[in-house]
Every structure is written in structure tokens, then in C-alpha cells.
Image (spheres, grey):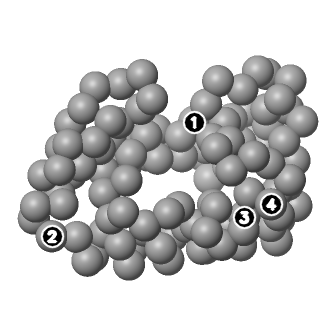
Amino acid sequence: MVSGKPDVWVSEGWAERYGMAAEATGLGDTAAEVAAFRPNRELLLGYYEAAHRATVEEVAGLSEEQLLTPVRYMPEGDERPSWRAFVGTARDFMEHTGQIAYLRGLVTGPGWHS
């Protein structure tokens, strides 16, 4: 944790609202656990908005020293400067967004590519 502040997942009670453990990340979940995860839209969007707000506030306030602080990128991963972890997170986000768009196209058809 670069800022030293707790994640909104815990500090704002989102883990409790989801009925999940505070340390739950989804990493290592089985296919059955993933399939069983079906939060309602309001809950999902509420957490997204809270996490987005906190992320923008925290990243905007980080010092150069904090951006250079080594962090472990994934539980089993290597240590790297926190700015590199942010880049990795952004890359993961873009990849997942593309995967979601691909799956949506498989289900609904080609969309605007008629």
C-alpha cells in the first residue's frame, strides 16, 4: 500500500456489504466461485464509484518518493516501484475491458460492425 491508507473495500464497509471477507480479492477463486458471484447492479456500481474516487484522490496526492517506493505487485510477484505497479494495473484494466467487449460480441453479435 503506497499511501498507507486502508483500502475502501474495508474502510468503507464494502466487504461487509458484499458478504465477503476483508482480504477477499478474487485471486485464486474457482470457476464455481466466480460463477456464483452475482452482485446487484447498485452494489457493484457503488463500489466502483467509491474505489474510483479514492484512487483518483490518492494517486493525485502521491509524492515522488511514494511513486518510487517498492511494492509487491501481486502476492507472488516481484517488488517494483509503485509507479510500475500502477502501469501494470492500468494495463490489466485495459486487457479485461477488451476481454469483456469480446465476450459481449460473442453473446450479442458484432454490434456496430454490421
Give the image location of residue 84, x and y in percent: 22, 44
Using the numbered discs, state the Cα–Cα distance from disc 1 to disc 4 in whole angstroms: 29 Å
Q: In this rendering, would 56 be left or right of 64?
A: right
Label 3 sits on what residue type?
Trp
**Gap in angstroms between the C-alphas marked 4 and 3:** 5 Å
Find disc 2 in the rendering and name its residue. Answer: 63
User: Quadrant of the rendered structure where residue 100 is?
Assistant: top right
**Earlier residue among tags 3 and 1:** 3
Residue at position x 41%, y 32% in the image: 74
Residue 53 or 102: which is nearer the viewer?
Answer: 53
* Amino acid type at mark 1: Gln
Q: 103 left or right of 83?
A: right
Mark before the other along the chain sequence, 3 or 2? 3
The residue indicated by pointer 1 is 99
The numbered dot on residue 11 is none
**What residue is rendered at 42% in x and 22% in y?**
76
C-beta proximity under 8 Å, tags 3 and 2: no
Q: Which residue is mark 3?
A: 14
Q: Position of residue 81 (x, y in %)?
A: 18, 44
Tell me whether circle 4 and circle 3 mark residues in contact (CB < 8 Å). yes
1 or 4: tag closer to the N-terminus: 4
Q: Secondary structure at mark 4?
A: helix
